[in-house]
Image: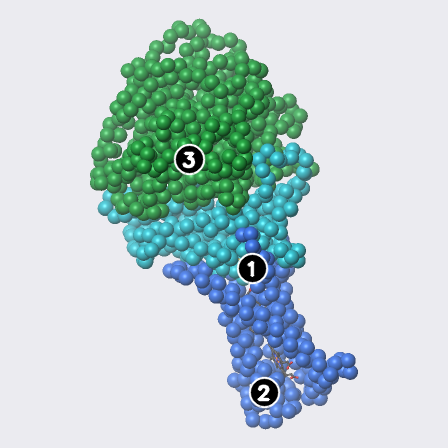
Amino acid sequence: MKVTLKIWRQPDAASKGAMHTYELDGVSSDMSFLEMLDVLNEDLIAKGEDPVAFDSDCREGICGMCGLMINGQAHGPEVTTTCQLHMRSFKDGDEIVIEPWRSDAFPVIKDLVVDRSAFDRIIQAGGYISVNTGSAPEAHSVPVPRDDAIRAFNVATCIGCGACVAACPNGSASLFMGAKITHLGELPQGQPERDTRVVGMVAQHDAEGFGGCTNIGECTAACPKEIPLDVISRLNWDLHAALRHGR
Amino acid sequence: MTDMPDTTLTGDPSHDAPADHGDDAAGYYTPGDPIRDTKAPEGPIDERWQTRKFEARLVNPANRRKLDIIIVGTGLAGASAAATLGEAGYNVKSFCYQDSPRRAHSIAAQGGINAAKNYKEDGDSAHRLFYDTVKGGDYRSRESNVYRLAEVSTNIIDQCVAQGVPFAREYGGLLDNRSFGGVQVSRTFYARGQTGQQLLIGAYQAMERQVAAGTVEQFTRHEMLELIVVDGKARGIIARDMVTGEIQTHLADVVVLASGGYGNVFFLSTNAMGSNVTAAWRAHRKGAYMANPCYTQIHPTCIPVTGSHQSKLTLMSESLRNDGRIWVPKKKSDCEKDPREIPEEDRDYYLERIYPSFGNLVPRDIASRAAKNVCDEGRGVGPEVDGVRRGVYLDFSSAIERLGRDGIEEKYDNLFDMYARITGENPYETPMRIYPAVHYVMGGLWVDYDLQSTIPGLFVTGEANFSDHGANRLGASALMQGLADGYFVLPHTIRDYLADGPFEKIQESHPAVVEARQAVEERVTHFLSTNGTRSVDSYHRELGNIMWEYCGMERTEDGLKKAIDLIRTLKDDFWRNVKVLGTADSLNQSLEKAGRVADFMELGELMCIDALNRRESCGGHFRGESQTEDGEALRHDDQFAYVAAWEFAGDGELPVLHKEDLVYTAIEMKQRSYK
Amino acid sequence: MRDARASRSTITLKLLMAASGLLFILFVLLHMYGNLKAFSGHDAYNEYAEHLRTLGEPMLPFEGFLWIQRTTLVVALVVHVYAAATLWRRARGARTQRYVMKKNLASSFSSRWMRWGGLTILLFLIWHLVQFSFGKVNVAGGETNDPYNLLVDTFETWWMTLIYLAAMFALGMHLHHGTWSAAQTLGLTNNVRARRNAKSLGWILAVVIAGGFSLVPICVLAGVITK
Ligand SMILES: Cc1cc2nc3c(=O)[nH]c(=O)nc-3n(C[C@H](O)[C@H](O)[C@H](O)COP(=O)(O)OP(=O)(O)OC[C@H]3O[C@@H](n4cnc5c(N)ncnc54)[C@H](O)[C@@H]3O)c2cc1C
Ligand code: HEM
Ligand code: HEM
Ligand code: SF4
Ligand code: F3S
Ligand code: FES
């Protein structure tokens, strides 16, 4: 099939970008979306034009490296990552608009590649359990109710892709933060640092320039791992607790 | 996944064969001196690690702050080491090419992690895990390393649980575990189908905690392009900031490579797009020996290739083989039909037929080769790619009848969804199609018991080293090895080396540093100025085809020699005719790939030479010339019970082969059999 | 972040917003109930207005309750508007480069319109107070010292009714999302059911309050309520 691609091109962070239009023929419906872009890039290279830069690594929906705004939707029209989106979700003759995540906390590096290191800094601000190597007690010394373990796991599946930020009208990273707060907060091991964790992470989140959440709910709809909105409620709850405890 | 069935033949059948199997690789390499691991203490195998830990010298805490450690890689092996060494108070610099350490390829591991916890009281022990691993590796691994791995495996689980890794649990709140791919004890801990992800996030968080504490400095989107060796010791790296293009010099007292596996030499593999051999290969060129490069693990259950656009292959967890039945049509004429319309009597459940006792649960290499054989016979299914149907059915219909759809959903839902998303077919209704794909490399840089390479001060951990898996890796053991190395082994062994430090400071103007830097700059300039006609990807794809065809599931003398010629020609052409656009001072993905592919070419050639040299079949290495009458792998312990450690002798020179003899004191060598 | 304080976070702002919002909800519920007295006729309605002023006497001075209420509301309003403005500014700063194409999948129109809706309510409120509370403006030109008559005069003017209905629509929308949002902000929606309940409550409050308020103007215009 044949598609028309409108792609954001921006040579580097300092330059101004613009949308460019490319026609691509011979697209197979079995291709993944990124393989389609690979084909476009081979074409561009053959023509001596700079290929389109985009991020990807695992190409199986788990590393969180990929992520494009496709026709106004983060990761495109299916609930999955961009690398797991296939061209069978499109029709012959479709026009596809491709943009990078738009967030001032995720500045564009080149074309469709953005800098998501703000997420690492949020984790550094408390998204962990402090346990030095070798000091851990025997794993069976602390039982964890199965349902809690399952809930912790479900939200721990966040891949840090940033689609929640990209989709949120406020540019908030609350879903990402909430997922980590809930993951660690569900487990007995996570209790001692619960207050400092939420305070630190939220402060870093705000300092990075993400917007505040007004519970709009676009984030969860864009999340390829279907992290539910509960995690934001949980995040808020934990922050109030920290407030009460005078943190 | 292999276990030790009691059907094992005792004795060594290769004694009956002529003692000398010839040297197919004569003329392709120079014989060198034997090499030996001098670090493993003598004595009973279960005391060696304690002894070594005790004997390794200590570094006093005040000195640690003055010691700089570079760690390349943030997968399980690298992140766990960075966290632990950071906690100990060293100055750690951590590098990865992704935009965050959390995205290292370990994240993709699905199945689980082994540990000899014996929570099920089913007779597991460190010794049994050791035994299974050596045997699974077809007696081509070093026993003291493997024993240590089994020994520390239990600490890993404790550590991860304390970090908040949400492993699967039973109703009572205790950890669940399962038997993985046919092993007869339950020792695989898992977090649904995302074990690697959860373990890596645990290690990543521990590492980020150290970043906040100021002991670890992280360099993301930085690619190591050269090793700096000063006076014979590893003293730093040259890295390229992939965003600005800046070529940076990072100096340190010690360098750790945890840069993962090189399966992408095959172009198509289950590895991430960016997985590469560059870090290891650059070290190899600077004097680190490369061990057993030909040992490749081919995973039988991957989603088949659909066309020439394919960029990578996706693994379906091996656990699927617990309930799915593998078959192809008996008649070639049925291959195009809807599988549901092929009656039972026209189906060939070939694994169950050939290996009645293990059936669909035979080890990975056997399952893979069997699939290749039936497809080569023309009985493969699915779309034709280049004239051959490469796929076999993995059928869940009887399991769905037995366990109900809900039962299957509970066990495999995310895998089934993934399959449906990729193929557009519903595996609850039609059988899945699978085909083998390159998955893991057992080969890697040679290291001693301390995980130190042949370059003093260069340590290698995780998949990047060769150490623990012999010729074949058991399922769920790579994660175990990565974390064992990073949390529990390296931090102890590295201190023995660092006890002599801090080493004399070196200046960026030191000739060895300048030389390393210039080499990198020249390569970059070369790629950008060649202005040829072919894209980097097209070379990589062609290299991959050669490797898969001749150095894949089955290797023969003729094929390998042909492959070497083809690779040499391709390499020449690549250096003259590659087309890399863009500039050096910005994000340039073609440039990054060009450097990686250049190294893959050299590695590919060495892999073929190694495979040529090893005229025996063992684990993931199957030589057509060395099989039993019924097509089973045949080892030759009398001639090949060694680790092949290759030394780089210079461009255009033949590699030098150093052999490390494998001696087993705690285990007896047996020929395996899964009939 | 070592010097991080919970009180300085965007979530604390939201918390204040939810608290003030809940006060507003309480107030409008009462106010709406009071307005419905218009159906009981001239005397009953004026008595109620008078009653509000003498409520709590002699413990409280004349209009004491009203002044307490007014102070609380003013403080709440300042907080609410301040928080809203701050969040708005942050959100604008968080995405200065807009998307060429952006679809909304899951969000309600009311959630995306909170800020404009809030602004509408604010403008309405100013006018409303000028008209009924401290300003006393009779658009029909009649007397202003009789609350019941002022009310009827106002809504017999068709465009006044229209303005009020528009404002009530904005209020309904604000409440529809605001109720659920406040529950989420307070951390009360930790599972699917709680989330569903909070959303239903949003609908109910929106319909009851906006609907309840609208009855009086409509009925006046329709001639059901007369002087
Ligand atoms: C799909 C899949 C499923 C698997 N499932 C299992 C399983 O269930 N159980 C199991 O035990 N094993 C499994 N394995 C194997 C296991 O995941 C890997 O062997 C293991 O994770 C490797 O870890 P590592 O830390 O050595 O390297 P990796 O996780 O690969 O990390 C490599 C790191 O090195 C960095 N790097 C590489 N080159 C450079 C460079 N030049 N410059 C800078 N940085 C560099 C990368 O950025 C990355 O951070 C699986 C593998 C795959 C592919
Ligand atoms: C006076 C002008 C007003 C403005 C400018 C305004 C603005 C806003 C804004 C921008 C929000 C944020 C959206 C969100 O957080 O979801 C909000 C929330 C809210 N508003 Fe208002 N509003 C006003 C008046 C009112 C009134 C009169 C009420 C009640 C009747 C009210 C009730 C609420 C509630 C309950 C919330 C939800 C709080 C939360 O999300 O936690 N607001 N308002
Ligand atoms: C159709 C709808 C409404 C009608 C008919 C109405 C009518 C009135 C009347 C008659 C008064 C004067 C009461 C008195 O001074 O005794 C009043 C006061 C007031 N109304 Fe309304 N109102 C309506 C809607 C609203 C809404 C939606 C709000 C808030 C968002 C609101 C907020 C107020 C306030 C704050 C006062 C002042 C109270 C005081 O003086 O202390 N009204 N309203
Ligand atoms: S919460 Fe979802 S959308 Fe946000 S980073 Fe995690 S996986 Fe991506
Ligand atoms: S879309 Fe944004 S406003 Fe909150 S609920 Fe999600 S972060
Ligand atoms: S490339 Fe890893 S999630 Fe898409």
Whether tag 1 and tag 2 are in contact, CB under 8 A, the answer is no
Q: Residue at x 54, y 84 (%)?
A: C160
Vertical order, B67 against B638 (above or below): below
Q: Chain of mark 1?
A: C
Where on the image, by quarter, is ligand 1?
top left
Please give the residue where the numbered disc 2 appears in the rendered image. Answer: C135
Of B179 and B341, the residue lying toward us: B179
Chain A in the picture: what colour? cyan
Please give the residue where the numbered disc 1 appears in the rendered image. Answer: C9
Q: Are marks 1 and 2 on the same chain?
A: yes
**Residue C97: percent from left, percent from top:** 39, 60
Q: Residue at x 48, y 47 (%)?
A: A120
The residue tagged with tag 1: helix, strand or loop? loop
Looking at the image, tell me whether mark 1 or mark 2 is earlier in sequence order.
1
**Residue B487: percent from left, percent from top:** 54, 33
Of C158 and B284, the residue lying toward us: B284
Chain that appears blue: C
